[in-house]
């Protein structure tokens, strides 16, 4: 299956530069539904509604605001945000190598694959092998879509993966979660150890599946055989009248595409 690149550039450290492309490593298997009007099956569209004036607000009247207290906001413009946004990275510059065993999984955010581009295959394979043998990962800062990420580049089954990491101040403290120390009898300790030992197994994610998702998909397949899908009514558009917002524009485009199939 062809994968679409999200970003392309180089991995860099010391005098080494490897051209790569960033692609998705995970496809979320969530089943999504559109909200429809039960009277005529029209897709429902979200609108920005102002409760004070009781009207839909057009895009050119919408600004951002940072909440500093109940019903108190600090307005900020796109230009002000752009002035503090980092420049988009063309390089994943590794600043140090770390032992991945020292990284608590709670810091893991989202995984991606790094695919070698033409001319970088040999260096790519070498870096994969060195990282695999040493269990080391390269730590780097990386800007994607105006956000600066802390990332770890590591070897995974013959390929390089890039994992975005949470910053330390994003991880919530666990002092109030872990129970206070108390006395545990030797009998209880022994019972827990025996239970864990009897349930030990090699990790095989293929053994497990999202059962609800599978059942939902089976239900949809059954319904499409038993009953024809409903169609949303065509919405008449007043001549010269533009869409109220971006979502409405996209919905109009999708209706035109479906109609012309």
Image: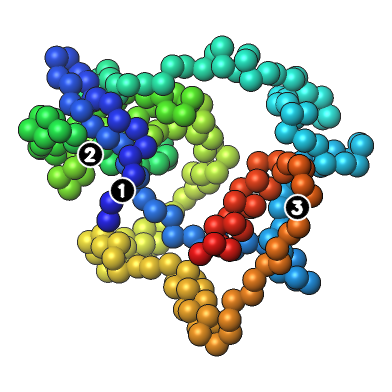
> In the image, what residue occupies the spot 59% across and 51% down?
253
How far is the residue under mark 1 from the one under mark 2?
A: 10 Å
Q: Is residue 5 left or right of residue 201?
A: right
How far is the residue under mark 3 from the one under mark 1?
A: 38 Å
Q: Is residue 26 left or right of residue 68?
A: left
> In the image, what residue occupies the spot 28% across and 41% down?
113
Q: Earlier in the sequence, mark 2 or mark 3?
A: 2
Quadrant of the image occupied by residue 231: bottom right
Residue 66: image tag = none
How far is the residue under mark 2 from the one under mark 3?
A: 46 Å
Q: Nearer the viewer, residue 66 or 165?
A: 66
Please name which of the two marks, 1 or 2, marks the residue nearer to the observer: 1
Q: Is residue 177 left or right of residue 149?
A: right
Report the residue that reaches farthest toward the bottom.
Answer: 226
> In the image, what residue occupies the spot 58% across and 40% down?
176
Residue highlighted by disc 2 = 115
Residue 88 screen position, x and y as percent: 41, 21
Q: Is residue 39 visible?
A: yes
Residue 237: image tag = 3
Residue 58 screen position, x and y as percent: 77, 35
Say if 173 sits above or below 89 in the image. below
Circles 3, 1 touching at the beta carbon (< 8 Å): no
Q: Nearer the viewer, residue 157 or 30?
A: 30
Circles 1, 2 touching at the beta carbon (< 8 Å): yes
Q: Earlier in the sequence, mark 3 or mark 1?
A: 1
Which colour assignment does the render follow? rainbow
Secondary structure, mark 2, is strand
Please name which of the two marks, 3 or 1, marks the residue nearer to the observer: 3
Circles 2, 3 touching at the beta carbon (< 8 Å): no
Residue 3: image tag = 1
Mark 3 Cα shell of 10 Å, populated few (<14), some (14-19), many (≥20): few
Q: Is residue 250 left or right of residue 75?
A: left
């Amino acid at each position: 299956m062809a994968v679409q690149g999200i970003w392309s550039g180089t991995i860099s450290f010391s005098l080494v530069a490897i051209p790569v492309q960033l692609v998705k490593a995970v496809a979320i298997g969530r089943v999504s539904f559109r909200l429809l009007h039960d009277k005529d099956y029209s897709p429902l569209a979200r609108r920005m509604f102002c409760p004070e004036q009781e009207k839909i607000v057009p895009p050119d009247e919408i600004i951002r605001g940072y909440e500093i207290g109940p019903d108190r906001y600090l307005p900020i413009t796109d230009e002000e945000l752009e002035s503090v946004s980092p420049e988009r990275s063309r390089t994943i510059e590794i600043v140090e190598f770390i032992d991945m065993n020292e990284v608590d999984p709670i810091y893991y955010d989202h995984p991606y694959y790094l695919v070698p581009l033409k001319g970088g295959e040999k260096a790519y394979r070498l870096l994969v092998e060195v990282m695999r043998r040493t269990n080391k990962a390269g730590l780097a800062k990386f800007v994607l879509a105006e956000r600066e990420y802390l990332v770890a580049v590591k070897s995974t089954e013959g390929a390089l993966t890039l994992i975005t990491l949470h910053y330390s101040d994003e991880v919530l403290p666990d002092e109030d979660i872990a129970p206070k120390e108390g006395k545990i009898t030797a009998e209880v300790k022994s019972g827990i150890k025996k239970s864990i030992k009897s349930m030990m197994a090699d990790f095989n994610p293929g053994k497990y599946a999202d059962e609800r998702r599978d059942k939902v998909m089976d239900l949809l397949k059954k319904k499409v055989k038993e009953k024809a899908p409903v169609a949303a009514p065509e919405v008449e558009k007043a001549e010269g009248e533009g869409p109220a917002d971006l979502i409405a524009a996209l919905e109009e485009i999708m209706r035109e595409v479906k109609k012309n199939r």
